[in-house]
Amino acid sequence: MNRTWCRGLVGRLVLPVLAALALVGPAAAEPTPAAPGEASAAMAGSVQETVKLDFRAALKAAVDSSPELQAARARAEGARWSTEEARSAGNPTLGIEGTYTRLDREVAASLSGRNFVVSPQDSYRAALVLRQAVATFGRLHYAVLAGQMAERAALEEYRGLLADELASAADTYLVALLAEEEVTIAEQRLESRQAALRDAEALFEAGTVARFDVLRVRSEATRARQQLIEARNAQQVSRARLASRMGLPPGTDLVLEPVPFETPPPAEMEEAMRQALSFRPEIQAVLWGLESARARIGLAESQDNPTVALQSQFTSQTAAGMSPGYQWVTGVVLNMPLYDGGATRARAGQAREAVRALEANLEAVRRGVRLDVENSFLNLASRWERISQARQGLEEATEAARVAEVRYGAGLSTSTELLDAQTALVSARQALLAARYGYLGAAVSWNRAISGEFPVEVPGPLQVFEGHLDSRPPGLHPPAAPQQEAQAPESSP
């Protein structure tokens, strides 16, 4: 009875609600028309932003937005503040010292029949203390010197990260340019395959070639479409990487300008080797670190030396006995360490071993720099020679493809000969592009190896550039490929 009554109550309440929702649902599901202004704003927000870039602008944006460089600049600034901390030991200090004392009983005495308090039960003492170091016997000198040398080492480390960031950004830009060139070659490959397909179909209709030729050329055209899709995808990926490196939002449409291709490799590397050994940030960072470590030897040994300071103190205290309520005391404080248990000797020994380790590390870094310069020089010269060979190969492949098209159109050859000639032409175009952009990448590595000038104005402390720009010969800046290489091959370098 109760169950039947409950089911009836649920039916009377729930079914009308479900019916109402069924009637309201379609109306609620219909979209509300947006205002014309809102619609246009939404459409404008969905349009990709187009950014036109050249080589230098891309490098500038990359170094300005690099989180790694920002962290390196913060470390360099931190080293500068460490030097300021060391220098502050020679500045005067001013402070307030205060004590409050409560004894279990008051201490009093009688003198000539008069009672007076020697130590009251509750007493206070407050003093304003001014201290000024007069002589630290080497402590301040070596501490400031070690901080300054460490600061210069941090600046050189920042310069090294800056050079790495520029080289990496340049490689990313060149990869994006190469991807665009690969798309152009893929489009040319597809056009040649489609033209060959039209010729094959016409010759098949005329009864000159077999149907196999049509199927073979159609298969190659399909393959060329797939290669074009892959080339366009690689282009989008390389642009996304470049935009991310420059701190641009995802989906930014980049229009890249070519880099001028005009600088040949140097004839010899002796001068570049001397420049690299003098200015490479890795070497400079170790040299400054070595000077800092040597200064720390003097700092450690100076801990056994005395110190002399001037101290002036104004005291307000509980007047009791012979002690007045206010007192001004000025004096010279001499601190003479006698024995510290060997701690100073141990710290000095650690500092000497740190110097020995840095001296060995300096030789290792110099060897690495010499090898880097030599490898970069050989790679640069080899890449330049490859350009000459690739140009000659492109000229030969272009002529062979022209002859193959004439022969196939006249019915004197098969589609296999035509497709092989077109494939060889595409490979020759790709080889020239690879040689050119390989040389551009080698030029970037060479400029990094010899510690050449930065191609853009970069952020950072001005001390980074002191003693580096005026005495250095200009470095080799990366260049870019000319337009339409396949149609108009240039002479060999």
Image (cartoon, helix red, strand yellow):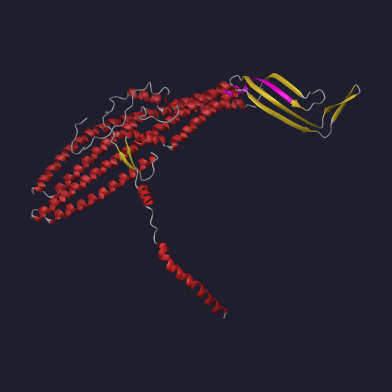
Determine if residue 335 is in view: no
Instruction: Give the residue furthest to the right.
Output: 113
Pinpoint residue 291: horizontal percent, then vertical percent.
49, 23
Name which quarter of the figure residue 317 lies in.
top right
Left or right relative to 370: residue 396: left
Q: Which residues are magenta?
A: 299-315
Left or right relative to 245: residue 413: left
**Quadrant where the image shows the C terminus:** top left
Identify whether 133 is placed above or below 32: above
Identify whether 369 is placed above or below 227: above
Name which quarter of the figure residue 459 lies in.
top left
Pinpoint residue 400: horizontal percent, then vertical percent.
14, 41
From the viewer's side, name the closer residue of 156 and 296: 156
From the viewer's side, name the closer residue of 269 and 367: 269
Determine if residue 327 is in view: yes
Pinpoint residue 468: horizontal percent, then vertical percent.
40, 23
Please say whether residue 305 is one of the residues in the magenta stretch: yes
Pinpoint residue 254: horizontal percent, then vertical percent.
32, 41
From the viewer's side, name the closer residue of 95 and 163: 95
Left or right relative to 353: residue 384: left
Left or right relative to 429: residue 300: right
Q: How many marks?
A: 0
For the point 28% across and 42% down, the residue is: 180
For the point 11% across and 48% down, the residue is: 408
Name which quarter of the figure residue 397 lies in.
top left
Instruction: Give the residue furthest to the bottom.
Output: 1
**Quadrant where the image shows the N terminus:** bottom right
For the point 38% across and 36% down, the residue is: 61
Please say whether residue 439 is one of the residues in the magenta stretch: no
